Image (cartoon, rainbow, N blue to C red):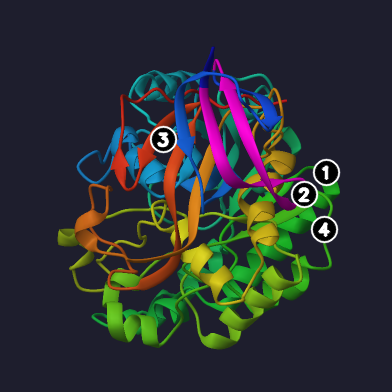
Amino acid sequence: MLDLIIKNGSCYINKDLKNHDIAIRDGKIVEIGKIDSEAKEIFDAKGLTVLPGCIDTQTHFREPGSTDTEDLNSGSRAAIAGGITAVFEMPNTNPPTSTKKEFQRKLDLAKNRMYCSYAFYFGATADNANELADLKNLEGCCGIKLFAGSSTGNLLVADEKDIEIVFQNSSKVVAVHSEDEAILNINKKLIKNGDVHSHPIWRSEECAISSTRRIVRIAERYNKKAHILHITTKQEIDFLSQHKGNITFEITPQHLTIYAPDCYDKLGTYAQMNPPLRDKSHYDRLWYAVKNNFNDTIGSDHAPHLKVNKDKDYPNSPSGMPGVQTLMPVMLNHINDGKLTLEQLINLVCENPVKIFGIKNKGFIKESFDADFTIVDLNKVIEIKNEKIESKCGWSPFNGYKLKGTPVATIINGEIKMKDGVILGEPTGKAIEFI
């Protein structure tokens, strides 16, 4: 007896949409084709598109530490509500996830509390090189996170010699928050109190490209993998397109959807994030990278803050916004607008994360692979509303946006965890396995 059959869907297999049924037993895909066997459960996907489970490779779920803002349970609910089946979660918590003991603590906190599959980044510091060299077989570890510029939390490796030590000793992909700390400090005089429009002036284009050049130079010198997060500038796009191979990079849905000065006019400090939202010339170049397949991943950089804190006067307001629940609807809307293809999106949220980070048995609809699916209705129009956001923060920068195309079901390890916006069952997410 099969556990589940997904019937009548248009399934994304081998870069094509095929009308197949998918049979699932014990959390794995066991057969693809015309299936007449009996199953405990049938999911009728008629009129729907069945995608491999989509992965968000940059989220901040704030636990341990700021659990009033988010925790592993609430963050994972937001993920599955938005069709995300697996997340990579960041180490800038309190205390930071920068020792094996704290890493194990996070795995313990996740067990039986997270709805989606999960992996955690190990935080780089100026003095934990020995631990960074010994992460190859650490359960649930997706990579090393390096903050080259200060952001939320106290994980910062700013000096070039310390960044070199991190790369020299890295045993996993190093994911980098790439801003130049020295330039950030020099530019502090440009901050205008009460004026969030000064945010991208303080955290300038030069601050971003200076850091990214340094990171690439060091990674290439040691022949190590660097994945540069939330790229925001046209200068970085032009530079990184010439440095592929061991260097990969991410763009967020926010930077592909809203830009300055409009975003600051409309959203105020709710548009504040690091690195910042910039003007349309940068937005256009980011889209150029997506259309020409220079960009490697889309990550939400889900970084929630409570409204009471976002409402503070700039620069006392914190940087960051939620995004794990809206990543897929926002990007599916861009597909409907003709800005990218479904194949390009699946490369960015399924296939490329698998290749870059060495994820086992996910990202593709194949026999013997994990039965993870993001089932979408490409024609359904939804409106993003703050009251429907599962994150504890209770808001979205896309509040009021009408979007065409949305996930209508999330299936993880063969279990339907979200259907038509309703979260189902208990949190049974597991740690992601790596090659």
Q: Calculate the distance from the C-alpha at mark 3 to the C-alpha at mark 4.
A: 31 Å
Membership of 25 in magenta stretch: yes
Contact? badges 3 and 1 (CB < 8 Å)? no
Residue 219 image label: 2
According to the picture, the residue beneath numbered tag 4 turns out to be 244
Query: How many numbered discs?
Result: 4
Q: Position of residue 188 (x, y in %)?
A: 41, 74
Boundaries of the magenta span:
4-26
Residue 96 image label: 3
Which sits earlier in the primary sequence, circle 3 or circle 1? 3
Residue 397 image label: none
Contact? badges 1 and 4 (CB < 8 Å)? no
The residue carrying pointer 2 sits among few (fewer than 14), some (14 to 19) or many (20 or more) residues within 10 Å by Cα, namely many
According to the picture, the residue beneath numbered tag 1 turns out to be 222
Report the amino acid beneath label 3: Pro
On-image quarter of the N terminus: top right
On-image quarter of the C terminus: top right
Question: Which type of secondary structure does the marked residue at label 3 adopt?
Answer: loop
